[in-house]
Amino acid sequence: MVPADTRDTDRLYDCIIVGAGPGGLQAGIHLGRYNFNILLFHTPGGRTHHARHIENYLGINAISGGQLIETGLEQVQRFGVRVEKAKVERVAGQEGAFDVTAGGKTYKARYVIASSGARETIAPYKNLARFFGTSYFTCLICDGYRTTGKKLVVIDRSVNGVRTSMGMKQLFTKDVTFIAQGIKLNPHYAQLLADEGIPLIEGKPEELVGEKTLEGVRLSDGRIIPCEVILGWGGISMNDEYLEGLPLERDADGFKVVTSGVCESSLPGLFVLGALRQGHSQAIISAGQGAEAAIEISTRIVEI
Ligand SMILES: Cc1cc2nc3c(=O)[nH]c(=O)nc-3n(C[C@H](O)[C@H](O)[C@H](O)COP(=O)(O)OP(=O)(O)OC[C@H]3O[C@@H](n4cnc5c(N)ncnc54)[C@H](O)[C@@H]3O)c2cc1C
């Protein structure tokens, strides 16, 4: 039992969770329901927060990411998790004795769960905000279904767009056009698209056209490519600056963290979930990983 007058930074938390996405929140629910001392830090936003319609989460017909997070924050606090709005700046230490710096103070914890996700680079097209999440999408797994039977434009700055265009045609809509943004496509790939009946346009998109509904994409040379929906991609970066300097095994690209089946990284006691971890990224996957990590941590705390 921690004496009431113990200073916040002297207390040894059982676990500190970084991030209030589905991963961190699900971990918080499980750990809170073991009556452990848990502290969860989060900053506003996160990828889930930007999702307008989540329709592939078991038990929920449709929910916005914002609603899912708000409900999760209420839920963790109901089970005694302390929630603080602050950016985690650094994690150091090892299993049983981690130091977590956030908002200029350093807190102690036996375990740390890094569930801070990733951030997307949003393409700089005029009017993008007007259509983001309703007719401009960035994730095939999340929103490909919403393009079913519609006139689709895929925009990409790499040959990945060729594969995406072909996949979209197989899965969702016969009417696909590929805009190769600012690149000259190798003739081999151009031929693949031609064989699939996917028009190829090389150019630089500048503006999404339409008032209430999307009507097309205007290119820098003035051409307007008509469409009802767009699948675009600006790139992604990990929210993992606070893990810098830790001996973490990464994937072959040096990008995502490699973990065990219970989401433990190569630094014992540090669990890494969701978009930060090698593997597919979806809200329900992060939530499952949060539960997995929490149960593993609870087992170890009880054994200590
Ligand atoms: C537009 C859009 C639509 C999507 N639609 C779907 C969908 O329909 N279905 C689906 O399953 N998935 C969807 N996703 C993907 C889904 O959001 C991610 O796979 C999921 O968010 C990963 O959850 P997470 O808990 O790992 O991270 P996130 O949801 O990104 O949460 C990370 C949390 O960490 C916080 N954070 C970041 N850095 C720090 C720091 N240094 N200190 C403290 N806190 C920090 C963030 O603010 C946030 O609270 C969508 C994503 C986007 C962008």
Image (cartoon, helix red, strand yellow):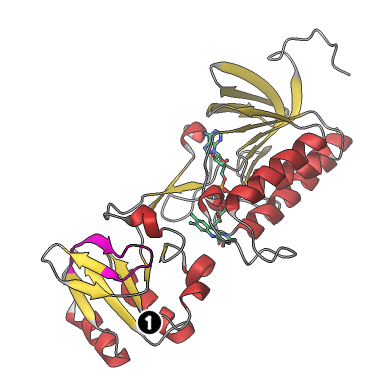
Nearest the eye: 140 or 291: 140
User: Residue under circle 1?
Assistant: 166
Identify the residue at the far top of this view. 5
Nearest the eye: 263 or 20: 20
The residue type indicated by label 1 comes to Met
Look at the numbered disc 1 and give the secondary structure of its residue: helix
* Residue positioned 62% across, 41% down in the render: 20
Magenta-colored span: 203-216
Nearest the eye: 252 or 220: 220
Q: Position of residue 188 (x, y in %)?
A: 22, 83
Above or below residue 89? Residue 50 is: below
Q: Position of residue 295 (x, y in %)?
A: 80, 47
Above or below residue 256? Residue 284 is: below
Asked which quadrant contains residue 215, the reply is bottom left
Nearest the eye: 81 or 272: 81
Q: Position of residue 292 (x, y in %)?
A: 74, 51
* Residue positioned 64% across, 54% down in the render: 286
**Does mark 1's beta carbon lie closer than 8 Å to ligand 1?**
no
Q: Position of residue 293 (x, y in %)?
A: 72, 47
Instruction: Check residue 77 for magenta coloring.
Output: no
> Taking 211 as reference, is 26 left or right?
right
Q: Is residue 185 visible?
A: no
| Quadrant (top left/top right/bottom left/bottom right) for the C terminus | top right
